[in-house]
Image: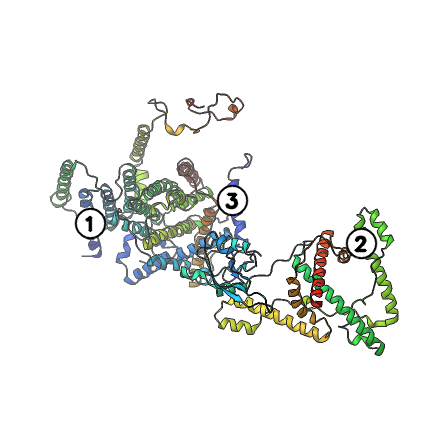
Amino acid sequence: MAATSPPGTGLLKGLGVTIKHLFQRPATLMYPYERNELAPRTRGVIALMDENCTVCMLCSRECPDWCIYIESHKETVPPAKEGGRARTRNVLDRFAIDFSLCMYCGICVEVCPFDALWWSPEFEYSEYSIDSLLHEKEKLRAWADTVPAPPPLDDGAVLPAEVADAIEKAEKERELAEAKAAEEAQAKESGAAGGAATPAAAAKEPEVEVKAGEIDQETFDQLIAEGKSERIARSKAKAAWVKKEKARLKAEAEQGGGDAAAPAAAPKPAEVHVEAGQIDQETYDQLIAEGKTERMARAKAKAAYVKKEKARLRAEAEQAAPSGESAAPEAEAPAKKQLSEVHVEGTGEIDQEVFDQLIAEGKSERIARSKAKAAWIKKRKQEQLDQEGGA
Amino acid sequence: MTGHDVVFVLVGLLTAAAAILTVTSKNLVHAALFLATTLAGIAGVFLVLAADFLALVQLVVYVGAVAVLFLFGLMLTRAPIGREALDNQNRGLAIGVSGGLFVVLSALIVDAVVGGSLGDTTVAEVTGPGIEDIGMAIFAEWVLPFEVLSMLLLAALIGAIVLARREPGDSGEEAMATRIDFGDAPPTEGTDSLSSGSLPELTSGERREGGP
Amino acid sequence: MTAISSGATTYIAQSVSLFDGFDGFVLPLVLKIAFVLQLFFVVPLVGGYLEHKAMGRMQHRRGPVEAGPFGVLQLVADGIKFIQKEDVIPRAADRWVFAAAPGVAMVPALLVFLVIPLGPGVFALDLELGLFYALAITSVSVLGVLMGGWASANKFSLIGGLRAGAQLIAYELPLILAAITVAVQAGTLSLVGIVEAQAGFMIPGTGINVWFVFPQIVGFGIFFISAMAELSRPPFDMPIGDSELVFGYMTEYTGIKYAMYMLTEYAGMITMSALMVVLYLGGWQLLPGVPMPGCEGAGGLFDCSPIGIALSVLVTLGKIMALVFVMVWARVAYPRLREDQLQRMSWLVLVPLSLLNLAVITVFKVVF
């Protein structure tokens, strides 16, 4: 208290503070009835995706408490090709984490090279007996269903390489499909006037063949004047030229083609967005009947719902657009496998075309470069595959 | 025998038993507790005799204050915690004094009731004096003795304080409570002249010996 | 024994000796015992619940929520738990003193309820010496605390008991002096009489009726602080002082004996609040100068219809609970005092102040 205030002011102030708090909302969370919003990386329980596990034993060895028990045996896999060599493979027999010893340091999750271990925010697995805290493989696998999706990346963050590859591939396939659709539309349009009857197949923008060799001098000069490096300026100018050219050609096409270019693009499977609010009642009931906890059952049922819904939407999209588009995701898997088997030495070259295109889309130079590099490697791989196929 | 009589006998027996236990108990604290019981029993006797005010005064003064002070003093000084006995060697003397007192008092009472000056008193219905009467008696009729008594008690109180309290410097040793010790504070005189001003002075005036 | 139906005009004449109850009818006696017991066991529970809830909310908690609707049965559940607990007696303890101590502390608290008037005719006894009786009986409680502290054979208990003894002696003085001042102003020691005197007390020279808290605000403050100290309620809980003495004289107590000590504290809160209501806050009077509906006697406070009686009891209980709330409030707001600050406050502040208060009020009483 300041020396000037009359005696007893402090006492009254104290009473004032407490009475003020009396009328404020209590901070208590009524836990079993209400639940806290847990942080995205909450360390509740460690989940195991056993299909990812290669029995490398890294987690078990790194565990400071030695609370991870792994047992496995070797199996011989017959050779993939005639005349090849048989390989051995580790098969996981037992994977157990003793949560009565675990100190939740997360080192095992950290060191797992194949993303077999995950953090799940579930924390309600207390037991009456300490033995029951030893979670075996099945239980750990069940926790994996409660692992939340990773939080979205920050704006401007570098995409993971796999995701970037996948996007690129999907985009290429879409372009292909669009080109095909455009051809079909053109073919149809000559016959029937009602081109709008097949709106799903209609491409957003008719594929215009533009030779990307020239640059838009105007843009180039302007960018140079703004102090950009020559290379960026050149690529951007090239993009600008392509764009202009495309616009010109499109205008010409529209003059001739009427309303064939309806802008309703078919939804891609990857774009299917499902609100994850509902649950799949059937799955839920079944899980409850199997004796799962309510929370887990709910999570799984939710996942099942999302899956079903996506499948339904995709099916609808396919019905609407039976063109090459729908085949793309299925075709993707084998192609990827084959590609991944080919080894190409990345020597630092980049795919200039891809680079230019990305720059034109406004990506940062670094991203564009890395993607372009990836594209180059992929091209090489494809070439090698083709060669092999030819041989 | 009326209800009064039954209760009187019961309370009297309780009081007497507690009194006997007070003097025979070997544990000092037990003795004090039995004393408190005895005093409370006497308050009960007063109550039965319709002397409400006296009973309550007995309770508040003897049980609530004297017995508590007794216990307080015992615990503060040398009360053995728990069941240890604490006896003294004055048993014979105590028996002599209390026996003599008992004889004298009972003789007086017997004399008064049976053959003496009160022999022809008739038994009357027990009714205590009203509190107003007591108040008037003390503060009007007997106010002078009352005030003198108050002064006497006050003098005794002050005397006790004077005896118990030792003024600082009286016997050479300073009272501990008035000295403030700053522990391991560095000596104020020394190499560092800058910090010497900010250090508090030792109130006792004596500087610590030694130091760096 | 006619106190139960006594009217205002005749109550002084009917004020009884404490002992008269023995010769009365059996039924009224049983009724009175039942009345006092239910007061003793129910009202402190309500006060305790109020404390739990208010304290919780002041600390941003909810307080009890699970036992019964809004947790109202929490203290009942606690009582059942205490009964089930093992009754541990330390080996070195003095068994009999240890066992008797909680009873010695509790019985006086129970007996005080005899004289507390909750409404017109709603009391077990209307003693002529009511106020003196209440103060005398409460002074015995300290014996139980000292016994428990000593018999536990534990140094923390002993120090706690000693602190309690010193504290109770120190604060009994200002408490009694403040109460006496009210008695001087009212001209009676009867608690019902004091209520009536307040209903008839006017500001000198005017016709405005006020309670005794108005002329005796200082005395009320002294009584309130002393009452909290007498009860060892925070911020005056040095005898328990859990950061210094574990739990003071209650350290070794478990189960039902511990519950008895706790019940003593809560019952003490109720009796002290009730005394303050009677002495300073006009008893069962709703507002100064406002007669109770359904009542006809002096000041509109006596000779009531059943509705009036029920209303009066509600008003009294409401005032008691308001005071209990203020005690809880102070408990939450203030930290514990130091032992020497406690003694200093009593002997150097409260006692002189209460003496001055007594002198001023006496002069005031004689002059007007």
Q: Give me the disc on residue A14.
A: 3
Residue at the left extreme, as displayed: B115
- In primary-sequence order, the first of circles 3 and 2 is 3
Q: x and y percent of residue A37 in the render?
A: 56, 58
Secondary element under disc 3, as helix, strand or loop, is helix
Secondary element under disc 2, as helix, strand or loop, is helix
How far is mark 3 from mark 2, CA to CA? 70 Å
User: In front here: C260 or A139?
Assistant: A139
Q: x and y percent of residue A192 in the render?
A: 83, 78
Co-location on one chain, circles 3 and 2: yes
Q: Tell me which amino acid carries mark 1.
A: Gly
The mark total stands at 3
Q: x and y percent of residue B37 in the render?
A: 24, 46
Co-location on one chain, circles 1 and 2: no
Residue at x 85% of width, y 57% of height: A214
Q: Nearer the viewer, mark 3 or mark 1?
A: 3
Give the residue at mark 1.
B12
Residue at x 72% of width, y 63% of height: A383
Looking at the image, can residue C200 be seen?
Answer: no
Residue at the bottom extreme, as displayed: A192
Q: Give me the disc on residue A235.
A: 2
- Tag 3: Cα neighbours inside 10 Å, few (<14), some, or many (≥20)? some
> In the figure, residue B117 lies in which quadrant?
top left
- Tag 2: Cα neighbours inside 10 Å, few (<14), some, or many (≥20)? many
Q: Is residue C361 above or below residue C304?
A: above
Co-location on one chain, circles 3 and 1: no
- Tag 1: Cα neighbours inside 10 Å, few (<14), some, or many (≥20)? some
Horizontal side of C156 relative to B11 (left or right) equals right
Q: Pinpoint the chain carrying mark 1.
A: B
How far is mark 1 from mark 2, CA to CA? 118 Å
Horizontal side of C54 relative to C141 (left or right) equals right
